[in-house]
Image (cartoon, rainbow, N blue to C red):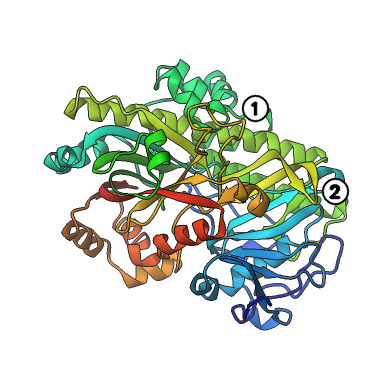
Amino acid sequence: MSERLDPPSGAAAAGVTAGAPPSPSPSPSPSSSSSPPPPPSPSPSHEPEPLQADAARAPEAAAFRRIGPAQWELPASGAMRVPVRVFADATLLRGLDAQALQQAVRVAALPGIVGASIVMPDGHWGYGFPIGGVAAFDETEGGVVSAGGVGFDIACGVRCLLTGLAASAIEAVRAPLADALYARVPAGLGSTGALRLNASRMHDMLTGGAAWAVEQGYGRAGDLERIEARGRMLHARPGQVSDRARERQRDEMGTLGSGNHYLEVQEVVEIRDAQAAAAFGLRLGEAVVMIHCGSRGLGHQIGTDYLARMVEEAPRHGLVLPDRELACAPIASALGQSYLGAMRAAVNCALANRQILTHLVREVFAHFFPAAELPLLYDVSHNTCQVETHEIDGRRRVLHVHRKGATRAFGPGHPELPATLRPVGQPVLIGGSMGTGSFILAGSVTGETLAFSSACHGAGRAMSRHQAARTWQGCAVVDELAALGITVRSASARGLAEEAPGAYKDVAAVVEAAQTAGLARIVARTRPMVCVKG
């Protein structure tokens, strides 16, 4: 008999599907009007605040049933085409906000969705789709692509560099190293870098990604082997990127941004899988560097541009949206293809950006540790839509897999992995909060059937940025982290308050749930020593 758990109050068991009458709309909000929101300049690196959900108007709540270890399902009903599946332990599930569940239910009603509308252990309320959401669509069945299903910070992701240095060596220069990294790596809202792109170089960057950056002298050719898609997303269409998006990115290459983006020097403090750790080059007591950032203003503008266009064109495709945040277009439509081409250009922008940042980090480390080479362990994005082949009901199907705040996690033997990593699976980089550390996982074979080869991407917020800013003060956060041996450098006291460790879920519980469910297996845990934030 399956175990049942009541979902959070206000969660809906039925959603609104394309072509069906919309459910009662959320409370009025400037962002719920038919006109697009004015693009902020400069943009934050995070998404706009979501619409306020009206839980009182939500359809009657149904019960989850446990279908496996750390696996829960809300059966399809009403307009839902597929069930909602949540990967979490009971505590995380009870803490899942009703708005995120409502969003997952609505995603389950979109045309062409297959399998399930999935929420990861770090899931929480987002913009349109929940953050931590995964959904796959079949173009041959009228499947759609959604700007809200990818997010505004397109291809935001994490890369990890190996230093080969003992943490004690970092500790000896921790403060000056933090100062040097902060001085060399532009960070903060609207930060700009030394690189200026004219129209020709912008086009080359948007088509070439990290491979273009290497050609420009940023990094090494060997880095590309350890980046998704070998550092270059094919079929990018820079011509579908607006002039406004290009303009916003012209001076932002090689910059960290703000919000939850960071550069951290971390110590490996626990090894859970010795074989995978050896394959990844991870050693207990050594330092690694993690870089978390995305496509900056360009990605945000692409999201803004196409959200408005998808809302405008929805009626032409027979799509009735419960709210504008769920705007989408048929994959096969001209608009759907235009968005995919622009999104892939933004993926290349993010890959190039992290490659340039890697070069800057290596320059700083070379000053303190001339022999350190800082090879790349892996780079993986967690806000994308990728064309992949997966088995559904015993049949291999080509799908457009949306991962919003979710990480692709290929298991051992997957042909897209480099030969050196194929025996153990893809590195899955899970960023925690500033005070709690991060995790490195390895993809699993079972994850393909469970969640389209997907896993969590971080700790996941437990409270909004506004609430965090009212709860903590940036200077107090710095002092508390300093007492833990963590040196923080940031341009924004408010940004530090928004990113206070207490504003996030327990990242250890998140990754344990992912492992228990079979999405990925834990390889190593790290703790922060130096943190640079915008």
Is residue 486 rendered to the left or right of residue 139? Answer: left
Q: Is residue 2 left or right of residue 503?
A: right
Q: Answer yes or no: do the residues labelled 2 and 1 have beta carbons within 8 Å?
A: no
Of residues 230 and 328, the one drawn nearer to the viewer in this rendering = 230
Q: Left or right: 363 with respect to 498?
A: left
Q: Please state which amino acid type lies under the numbered disc 1.
A: Leu
> In terms of image quadrants, where is residue 111?
bottom right
Q: Is the residue 161 above or below the residue 306 in the image? A: above
In front: 308, or 272?
Answer: 272
Residue pointed to by mark 2? 142
Counting residues from the start of the chain, the first of labels 2 and 1 encountered is 2
Q: Quadrant of residue 478?
A: bottom left
Q: Quadrant of the N terminus?
A: bottom right
Q: Residues within 10 Å of mark 1 (few under 14, many from 20)?
A: some
The kind of secondary structure element at disc 2 is loop
Q: Quadrant of residue 326?
A: bottom right
Q: Which residue has dot 1 on it?
A: 234
SS for dot 1:
loop
Residue 160 in the figure: left or right of residue 102:
left
Q: How many marks?
A: 2
Looking at the picture, which amino acid does disc 2 mark?
Gly
The residue furthest left is 172
Looking at the image, residue 20 lies above or below residue 137: below
User: Above or below — where is 120 with respect to 374?
Assistant: below
Please provide percent x and percent y for residue 219: 39, 22
367 in relation to 98, above or below: above
Q: CA distance from mark 2 to mark 1?
A: 23 Å
Where in the figure is residue 410, as x and y percent of width and height?
58, 41
Q: Residue 362's spot in the image, x, y percent?
A: 30, 28
Frontmost residue, 306 versus 532: 532
- The answer to whether residue 187 is visible is yes
